[in-house]
Image (cartoon, rainbow, N blue to C red):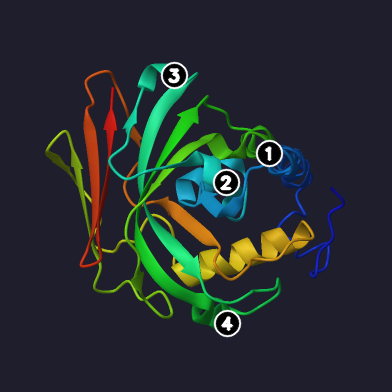
């Protein structure tokens, strides 16, 4: 895929050659899957905390893609033995985009494009690396996503949202601010729009973005049986493990 950008080379989210190469490889995976019949449903954000940025030597979160074939029904059972690396679960917020959003927009425009929010759980298959190029080339370890109910949230307001996570019926600590570990949703949406624009694509109305783990990522073991993520007052989603 030929990558073009609406921003200058110095300000492009892919100005770092490692990111440009990693995203080019990632788009090859995406294009191949689409050619095979997969339907793109949106994007994912990862490695957005200050510690993760420092570890990778990056200035902004990494962006990956999501396809319909990776979506699991709420309450589905996943066999952890089928993961090739370390299985990890991440309770997240899913953001629904209501209008096409070009690269180069300001944060207010990005905020206005958010129409709904809901709980999600991403399952990732991690082979640890400090190389952002390799992480991007593998779509940031993405394996599955479980999507919960979404509720109208014009502008992506999160101030009243409370995240509750239950792991095998045991409560997992969550921050009072559901965006404490991810950064503000409008900022993330703007970054995704800029990144996909640099790839010659557009963030589209109807696209979903999972915004990164609300808690520290949860390394799963053979003892894990169920994970529930509630995003009050919107609703909850769960996944079971075998």
4 displayed left or right of 125: right
Residue 37 position, x and y percent, is: 67, 42
- Inter-mark Cα distance, 4 to 1: 31 Å
Label 3 sits on residue:
82
Q: Looking at this view, is 172 or 64 the one in front? A: 64
- Inter-mark Cα distance, 3 to 4: 41 Å
Label 1 sits on residue:
33
Work out whether mark 3 precedes mark 2 in sequence or the reverse, and give the earlier one. Answer: 2
Work out whether mark 2 precedes mark 4 in sequence or the reverse, and give the earlier one. Answer: 2
Which image quarter: residue 139? Answer: top right
Label 2 sits on residue:
67
71 displayed left or right of 148: right
Numbered disc in front, either 3 or 4: 3
Assign a secondary structure to mark 4: helix
125, above or below 106, in the image: above
Circles 3 and 2 in contact, beta carbons < 8 Å:
no
> Which circle marks residue 109 in the picture?
4
Assign a secondary structure to mark 1: helix
Residue drawn at x 77%, y 56% as measured from the top left: 199
- Residue lying at the far right in this picture: please name it: 2
Residue drawn at x 74%, y 38% as measured from the top left: 32
Q: How crowded is mark 2: few (under 14 residues within 10 Å), some or many (20 or more)?
A: some
Assign a secondary structure to mark 3: helix
Numbered disc in front, either 4 or 1: 1
Residue 21 position, x and y percent, is: 78, 41
Which image quarter: residue 204? Answer: bottom right
- Inter-mark Cα distance, 2 to 1: 8 Å
Residue 109 position, x and y percent, is: 58, 82
- Inter-mark Cα distance, 2 to 4: 26 Å
Circles 4 and 1 in contact, beta carbons < 8 Å:
no
**Could you tell me which quadrant the C terminus lies in?**
top left
């Amino acid at each position: 895929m030929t990558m073009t950008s609406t921003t200058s080379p110095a300000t492009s989210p892919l100005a770092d050659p490692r990111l440009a190469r990693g995203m080019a490889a990632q788009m090859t995976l995406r294009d191949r899957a689409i050619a095979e019949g997969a339907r793109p449903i949106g994007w994912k954000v990862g490695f957005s905390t200050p510690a993760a940025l420092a570890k990778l030597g990056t200035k902004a979160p990494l962006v990956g893609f999501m396809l319909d074939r990776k979506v699991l029904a709420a309450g589905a059972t996943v066999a952890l033995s089928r993961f090739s690396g370390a299985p990890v679960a991440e309770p997240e917020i899913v953001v629904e985009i209501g209008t096409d959003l070009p690269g180069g927009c300001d944060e207010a425009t990005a905020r206005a494009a958010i129409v709904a929010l809901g709980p999600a759980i991403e399952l990732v298959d991690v082979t640890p690396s400090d190389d952002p190029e390799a992480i991007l080339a593998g779509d940031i370890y993405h394996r599955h996503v479980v999507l919960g109910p979404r509720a109208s949230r014009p502008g992506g307001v999160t101030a009243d949202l409370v995240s509750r996570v239950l792991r095998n019926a045991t409560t997992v600590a969550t921050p009072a601010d559901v965006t404490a570990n991810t950064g503000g949703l409008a900022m993330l949406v703007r970054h995704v729009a800029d990144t996909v624009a640099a790839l010659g694509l557009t963030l589209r109305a109807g696209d979903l973005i999972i915004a990164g783990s609300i808690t520290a990522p949860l390394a799963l073991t053979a003892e894990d049986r169920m994970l529930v993520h509630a995003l009050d007052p919107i609703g909850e989603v769960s996944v079971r493990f075998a």
